[in-house]
Image: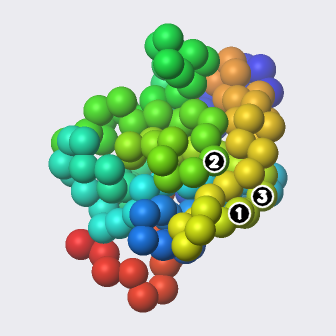
Amino acid sequence: MGNNTHVRLKLDRQETSANATRGVLTIGGKAGTWYILEPSGPDSTTEGSDQRIPQGTYRVTSYSSPKYPDAFELKDVPGRTYILIHPGNFHSNTEGCLMPGKVKMSDDDDLAVGRSRVAFNEIKAHLVGAQRITIEISNSITGDALE
């Protein structure tokens, strides 16, 4: 995309299981068959809680560490740090982070995603060169106890 000034990601949380939440990601209003796996609810501002972050809009910046090279980080998440977007398929791969996938899968009774690296690379291609990236997270899970 090159020199886009602002790329807007939207995550609509749609399903939840005992340990995971799954939603649909759009970029700039376009759906690309991307799903996002996060920990289950309720939304939490407690560091290390292994629960999903509160709904809201967050800045996204590039992030790299030995464990997660070439990832992205959500900034200014209330009470939470190092909330990343990185590849992963199962709830056991995250402690609050957002993991993209191309297909819906299950992990016993929990939600999961597949082809995560493919999805991550597609999303990353939309973000490279952007001056500003934001993600808006909303909950439209039916029957979910939101706090």
- Locate residue 125, reporting x and y percent: 77, 28
Task: Say which residue appears at 31% left-offset and 75% top-offset.
Answer: 146
Which is nearer the eye, 70 or 127? 70
- Left or right of 73, for residue 131: right
- Foreground disc of the pair 3, 2: 2
Amino acid type shown at disc 3: Val
List the residue tagged with mark 3: 103
Do residues under tags 3 and 1 come within 8 Å of each other at their CB atoms? yes
Do residues under tags 2 and 1 come within 8 Å of each other at their CB atoms? yes
Report the number of numbered marks: 3
- Left or right of 122, for residue 20: left
- Foreground disc of the pair 3, 1: 1
- Locate residue 95, reporting x and y percent: 38, 43
Q: In the rendered view, would you say 89 is above or below 4?
A: below
- Locate residue 99, reporting x and y percent: 58, 44
Q: Residue furthest top?
A: 66
- Quadrant where the image shows the C terminus: bottom left
Q: Which label is found at residue 105?
A: 1
List the residue tagged with mark 2: 89
Task: Say which residue appears at 39% left-offset and 36% top-offset.
Answer: 83
Secondary structure beneath label 2: loop
Disc 2 or 1, which lies upstream in sequence?
2
